[in-house]
Image (cartoon, rainbow, N blue to C red):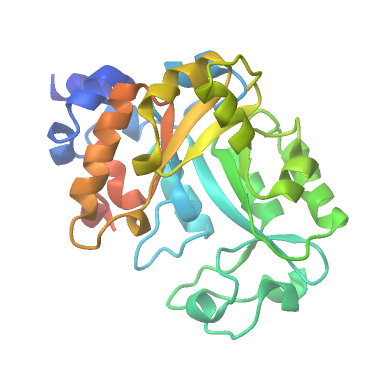
Amino acid sequence: MKNHKFAIIFVTQVVLSISLISVKGNTFKNDPVLASGCQELIDVWDAEKVRARGPILIAHRGGVVGPAIPECSKMAVKMAATYRYDMVELDVRESKDHHPIVFHDNNMMDACGIDKKISDHTLEALLGIKFLDSDETLTSLDTMLRLCSSLNLGVMFDIKQGERSEVFFNRILNLIDKYNLDRACMTLGDSQVKEQFQGKVLLTISDEMLESVKQGKEVDLYGYYWFGVPEKWPLELVKPIQENGALVIPALNTFRYSKEQHRSEASRDAERLLKAGVDGFQIDCVYQDFFGRPSVSKIL
């Protein structure tokens, strides 16, 4: 009975919105839904299928991270698959020789102890660099997308700003096709990113599109998703945006909340957004227990 109830919490948005607190005490290892093998790869271009999965979860900073698991590492991605995330966010930067590398920061000092940028090194040099206090090394997007594909994880790209070449963008698009992720990707990014990726991955809706929805106009939002900060969202726009064809994916990130009260503040946001009918969340893994996964404090 306990496992059956846990499974319902995991797959049913209505039950989840009521049970944000009650799911926190459940354990992953005893649950057949979470402990089973890879789930089906998400199709972000089919809103009906997305909503049938319940609220989807996208792991911020490359997966489930912790003291021994660096963000944007292969182990973080593997952990995201273990705990049944639907997608991972991958931060992508361009190497000196125009290869896409999975790395968040502008400088490698904090993560790797090297006072250099990704763009200062070639792909070959970067792949030998380890994260601090870890055996995990920096990873090419090629390797990471191959891993995501094997684990049936969709990808939210965050293409970092800088001088980005045509070769760099083409390599990303070719890798999406190479690993059959063409229906499982969305991206964050500026106007150059949107221009390069138009029609290839889901894009964030523009301010102009949002304004048209506010005015009650019909606008074709197929191929787009609404992403952003929960506290700034007019919740009455969730349904109209969905009716015009877009997905609605708010973010629950620790840096958006107060240090002392971030969990209670994020929990309140999750509950009210679920009631508004959002399609899923991009989350920091410290909030995964709001959604039927085990608390990271108990597993990392």
Q: Residue 298, position in %: x, y? A: 21, 53
| 228 lies left or right of 141 | left
Report if residue 5 is visible in the image: yes
The image quadrant that residue 177 belongs to is top right
Report if residue 53 is visible in the image: no
Q: Residue 156, position in %: x, y? A: 57, 42
Q: Quadrant of the N terminus?
A: top left
The image quadrant that residue 149 belongs to is top right
| 239 lies left or right of 10 | right
| 274 lies left or right of 88 | left
Q: Residue at x 33, y 32 (%)?
A: 34
| 141 lies left or right of 245 | right
Q: How many marks?
A: 0
Q: Residue at x 25, y 25 (%)?
A: 16
Q: Residue at x 29, y 36 (%)?
A: 270
Q: Residue 296, position in %: x, y? A: 27, 52
Residue extending farthest front? 215
Q: Residue 132, position in %: x, y? A: 47, 78
Vertical placement of residue 87 versus 235, above or below: below
The image quadrant that residue 27 belongs to is top left
Q: Quadrant of the C terminus?
A: bottom left
Q: Residue at x 56, y 30 (%)?
A: 210
Pick whichever, 2 or 288, lies toward us. 288
